[in-house]
Image: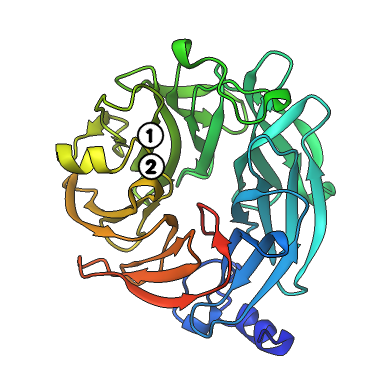
Amino acid sequence: MWHRREFLKAALAGLGSLGLPPLGWAQSEPRGTWLWSAIDDAQGHQLIGYQPATGSHFRIPVPERCHSGCRRPGHPQIALFARRPGRSIHVLDGIEQRETARIEAGPDYHFYGHGAYSPDGRHLYATANRIEDGAGVIRVFAANDGYTLEGDIDLAGTGPHELRLMPDGQTLMVGLGGIRTHPDYGRVKLNLDDMAPALLQVNRTSGEILERHAPSHHQLSCRHLDVAPDGGVLAGYQFQGPAWKRHPLLAYRDPRGEFTELTLPDDLTDELRHYIASVAMAPDTARALITAPRGHRVLLLDRDEKRLITSHHLPDAAGALPDGHGGFWVSSGHGALYSVPGDGSPPRRIDRLDLSWDNHLS
């Protein structure tokens, strides 16, 4: 059972000189760690706050399926984004355990399920589709002014998905999926023959596209990614071509800006069924973890050496997040939450709830 007093103590524990609350982040005080995710349960679509150390949690109902989330620096707010082609961002107050704001995409836009705050928490950036012409943009909202819309960053492409703030605090890395959709057709992909995916680096102030890295095949949709403290970026693909073809499913942009694709063993690549979901890189080690729900796999990599350490079977592996101690938390669409050590040893189940976790943890 979740208790407000316990939550308040955990949320206020360990505040450092930056004034950042520990919501959604691994801290030295384990009871201060909370995870956030979209879920589905018997009551419908929900958002959940969950404390791994105690199993305490609470749920907030929402009218649509959501996808990923991000924490607002300096505030107890967490923004969780509707899944494509959703039109809302739900802003929660973690201490008050309620939704405090709802941001709409606009009459001719929909969101793609991901976003990021500026380092000072003043702006929220969300990937979106301009429905009329299928243009991919980043919508910029003023968090200090009731999340009013400030404008768009045009990405000169289609289907932006996950975006992450780089260590410089000024640029964003964006996975441009390359897939055009329209809400009238749900999640139907309308341009598989002429996709143009890319991994982009964008200046969040000027909107200038500083880097554009194209995958080796035009149907390798660049969707999910994570950024390491040194500026390395690991990205995951979802191949949209014939099932019998085999292509790399991971790419790495090193801190110098060089882009390469990572090759896994053929049998493992086939087992992943063309689909990478969450990507997480530990901030304290060179370990990275990737989930592949269709293949029921989690992959542990050494990002410095660009090599696979091990692969674990994990049913419907979904969200992934570093635990602050060299390992990772991993959620499952079957309701379980796991601890996956960074030393290659097997996952350990730490809880199971009567719900289905979505593909991301925050």
x, y percent for residue 92: 74, 62
* Residue sitting at x 43%, y 45%: 277
* Residue sitting at x 77%, y 35%: 105
Q: Position of 251 compared to 310: left or right?
A: right
Residue identifier under label 2: 276
Of label 1 and label 2, which has the lower sequence position? 1
x, y percent for residue 333: 49, 58
Q: Position of 38 compared to 268: left or right?
A: right
The quadrant of the picture occupied by the N terminus is: bottom right
Q: Are marks 1 and 2 in contact (CB under 8 Å)?
A: yes
The quadrant of the picture occupied by the C terminus is: bottom right
Residue 233 lies in quadrant: top left
Answer few, some or many: residues within 10 Å of disc 1's Cα (few below 14, many 20 plus, some between 14 and 19): many
Q: Is 23 in front, or is 321?
A: 321
Q: Position of 239 compared to 358: left or right?
A: left
* Residue sitting at x 47%, y 10%: 194
Q: Position of 74 compared to 275: left or right?
A: right
Provide the secondary structure element on which disc 1 rests.
strand
Q: Amino acid at mark 2?
A: Ile
x, y percent for residue 345: 21, 70
Q: Is 321 in front, or is 19?
A: 321
Alpha carbon separation for disc pair 1 and 2: 6 Å
Residue 350 vs 227, above or below: the answer is below
Q: Which mark is residue 4?
A: none
Q: Amino acid at mark 1?
A: Tyr
Provide the secondary structure element on which disc 2 rests.
loop
Answer few, some or many: residues within 10 Å of disc 2's Cα (few below 14, many 20 plus, some between 14 and 19): many
Residue 59 visible in the current orientation: yes
Residue identifier under label 1: 237
Residue 93 visible in the current orientation: no
